[in-house]
Image (cartoon, rainbow, N blue to C red):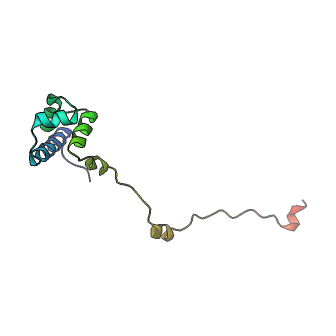
Amino acid sequence: MPSSNTTEELEAQLGLQIRALRLRRNVDQQALAEQAGVALSALKNVESGKGSTLKTLLKVLRALDRLDWIASLSPTISISPLQMLKQKAPRQRASSRRTTSTAGR
């Protein structure tokens, strides 16, 4: 189902979630920026939804121990053995057999 939010709105929502997580852990921006190995201004940009590099986002999420957010974007897909059994095998073409009467021609 497509989202009606703009890219900017999605960036802002993600930034708010990161900020809320930081505040729940009672960590100030300077401490998180140092822990993540990013500039304070880069962390502020992430939290305010003003854009960031993917590298900065990953560093911040790692510092917050939330890389699972990234993993949830692409869940492992597995095929159920029951689904495999339910699927019909593809039809094969009949082989062209030669009869003995046409083989000698």
Which percent across, then down, holds residue 7? 21, 39
Q: Identify the residue at image location x=25%, y=37%.
A: 59
Q: Nearer the viewer, residue 101 or 68?
A: 68
How many numbered tags mark residues here? 0
User: Which residue of the protein is positioned furthest toward the right in this rendering?
Assistant: 104
Which percent across, then down, holds residue 104? 91, 61
Which percent across, then down, holds residue 63? 22, 41
Residue 83 placement: quadrant? bottom left
Q: Identify the residue at image location x=75%, y=62%.
A: 96
Specify whether 59 is left or right of 78.
left
Specify whether 98 is left or right of 75.
right
Quarter in which the C terminus is drawn: bottom right
Q: Identify the residue at image location x=49%, y=66%.
A: 84
Is residue 49 visible in the rendered image? The answer is no
Residue 54 placement: quadrant? top left
Which percent across, then down, holds residue 90? 57, 63
Q: Which of 24 and 3 is in front in this view?
A: 24
Quarter in which the N terminus is drawn: bottom left
Residue 31 placement: quadrant? top left
